Amino acid sequence: MKAADLNYKLEIEPNKEEFAPDQTSVKTNPPVSVTLRQQFNIKKSENENPIIFSCIKIGNTLVFTDCDNNRLIICNSDGTDIHHIPLSYRPYHMTVVNSNSVAVSYSDRTILIINISTGSVTSTINTSGYCYGISYNDNNLYVVTDRSIIHVMDLRGKVIRTIPLPSYRITDITVDRDRLVCIGYTSIYCCSLDGKLIWKFEKDKFQDLDGVTTDNDGNVYVTDYNTNTVVVISDDGQHHRELLTKSDGLNEPRGIYFDKKENILLVCNYLDGKAFLFDVKRKST
């Protein structure tokens, strides 16, 4: 565990919840394949030490949270024109709001709406608890608060409703159509938007799940920090496969984002500044 993480990972999960599918029946054939499109380094120099927690892709612009240097890193999708947006807080999770703006969560009870074109903070939202995973859908922010509940709020910070979480140690979430996918360090949960559990996936090998995203078919992609992998799980939670591994260049990956317009998967390593773009294709079944 790196020093930057010591205050981020705290509790130990209680007894395993029910609803887990019979893992003996889980197959390993989600119908997707990936091809490397681009690999690049977002460090401007060897003296830089970015610690990348999350990433997103907006058109041809890539955005990364550098949590150890209190900044966003911005570049083109080919890794050129790297520049920074300095921040007053340590950024962790991030979500796309529109073509120019992102919402960034901070563990100190703050969310910032940032215009990545101008580099300006357009809104500051103070929350009642510490913030973790964040996702934007249908004009609302879904924010994991104190890892025990999701606050659904508008962009002014007004809480519209709350959603109970299936575990008290949820770190990251993404809203996919009428479903909410959230992860703890060892488990992936798919819930309805009112918090009802639809399915749960866990496997002993994966003990440090960090980032989560979904594609147009509802397949779930997660990074596993310790095994240097990206795992894909089918939309029903019944099929899984290690899609990317260390042989693909992954080294303690954390950030992951699926561009649904272009079917491109963005993955970034935590410590070495390397980022990868993969074309994702649906296999015929």
Image (cartoon, grey):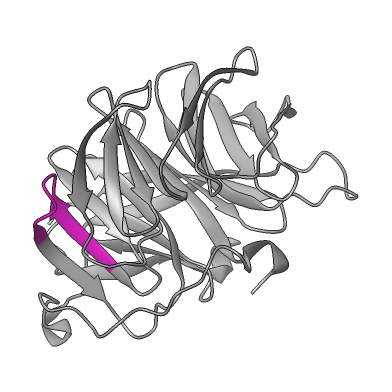
Query: In this orientation, which residue lies closer to the viewer: 92 or 33?
Result: 92
Q: Residue at x 41, y 80 (%)?
A: 12
Q: Residue furthest right?
A: 47
Q: Say how many tags the image has.
A: 0
Q: Is residue 215 visible?
A: no
Q: Quadrant of residue 189?
A: bottom left
Spot occupied by residue 238 in the image (x, y as percentages of width and height) = 14, 69
Q: Is residue 91 magenta?
A: no
Query: In this orientation, which residue lies closer to the viewer: 284 or 167?
Result: 167
In the picture shown, does residue 122 fall above or below 32?
above
In the picture shown, does residue 269 fall above or below 238?
above
Q: Residue at x 66, y 48 (%)?
A: 67
- The residues colored magenta run 188-197
Query: In this orientation, which residue lies closer to the viewer: 28 or 94?
Result: 94
Spot occupied by residue 142 in the image (x, y as percentages of width and height) = 30, 39
Residue 31 falls left or right of residue 172: left
Q: Residue furthest top?
A: 118
Q: Is residue 15 visible?
A: yes
Q: Quadrant of the C terminus?
A: bottom left
Residue 14 falls left or right of residue 35: left
Spot occupied by residue 269 in the image (x, y as percentages of width and height) = 61, 56
Query: In this orientation, which residue lies closer to the viewer: 68 or 226?
Result: 68
Q: Quadrant of the N terminus?
A: bottom right
In the picture shown, does residue 11 fall above or below 250?
below
Residue 282 falls left or right of residue 60: left
Secondary structure mostly seen in magenta is strand
Q: Residue at x 68, y 61 (%)?
A: 4
Q: Residue at x 68, y 69 (%)?
A: 2
